[in-house]
Image (cartoon, rainbow, N blue to C red):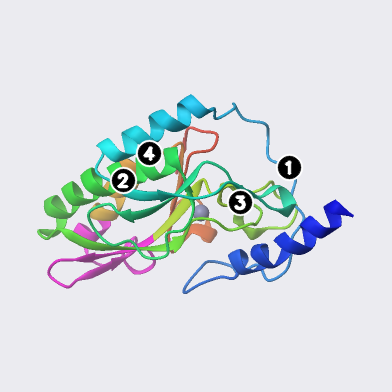
Amino acid sequence: MHRLRALLIVTPLILISCVPSGHRPPPVRRPVPVRPAPARPAYDAAARRQCLSDLSADGARYTLLPDRVFAGGCSAIGTVQLSDIGMPVSNLGAMTCPLADAFTRWTRDATQKAAIAWLDSPVVKIESFGTYSCRPVNGVEGNRLSEHGLSNAVDISGFVLANGRRITVLNDWNGPDQYARNFLRAVHDAGCRRFHVVLGPDANAFHRNHLHFDMGRGPYCR
Ligand SMILES: [Zn+2]
């Protein structure tokens, strides 16, 4: 009975969390079976404290989120809600601390350096498709659970510059402006030095409109 009651309570939360927002890639409108995620090293209390300390030192403001475990192997364990990393980022939800810290440093260092180098204008806003989403890899039934289901991944779709220009992965990765192409490849490659797994338009068609960054098993950079 207790299990049933717990399921009844968490199911609406999952449904809410899985509702696609904005231009999210292939939507998943119903629960999709997934293979269990492989076991990973324990993320203990000391590691959590160290990560939160690093996150503060890197200039991020955040709130701690309560640990939550959902059906289908999905969870938000040891996660934070970033509230200020120096510029607005749309659609950020629960992120594991290591993901939040890598993302903060990538935003602060890599994106600005690349924007100044290639586009002569700093980034003032980053657009994302979100973080937590309980679904299999690429939204394909039967695939293992996506790192998004563990709050351990973020999808970046675009950048707004101080001069008003908007660069998107969808339009500019293979677009006519070589400088915009160089900028996107620079932030992609910088992601490969900070995140465990990076997937972009060259990985597969599922990623034609965003850069996927996660802190799962890697390294993998494509
Ligand atoms: Zn993703």
Name the residue at the left extreme: 120
Q: Nearer the viewer, mark 1 or mark 4?
A: 1
Residue 42 versus residue 85 in the image, above or below: above
Residue 135 appears in view: yes
Is disc 1 in contact with disc 2, using a CB cutoff of under 8 Å?
no
Q: Which residue is mark 4?
A: 192
Q: Earlier in the sequence, mark 3 or mark 2?
A: 2
Segment tinted magenta in the rendering: 157-181
Q: Which residue is mark 1?
A: 36
User: Earlier along the polypeptide chain: callout 1 or callout 4?
Assistant: 1
* Mark 1, secondary structure of its residue: loop
Q: Assess whether mark 4 and mark 1 are in contact (beta carbons under 8 angstroms).
A: no
The amino acid type, in three-letter code, at marker 2 is: Thr
Name the mark on residue 160: none
How far apart in space, not on screen, are marks 4 and 3 (Cα)? 21 Å
Q: Nearer the viewer, residue 168 or 54?
A: 54
Whole-number angstrom distance, CA of label 4 to CA of label 2: 14 Å
Mark 3 or mark 1, earlier in chain:
1
Label 3, secondary structure: give it. Answer: helix
Q: Position of residue 126 (x, y in %)?
A: 30, 61
Q: Which residue is mark 2?
A: 104
Q: Which residue is mark 3?
A: 149
Residue at 28% across / 42% down in the picture? 105
Which mark lies nearer to you, 4 or 2? 2
Give the SS element for disc 2. Answer: helix
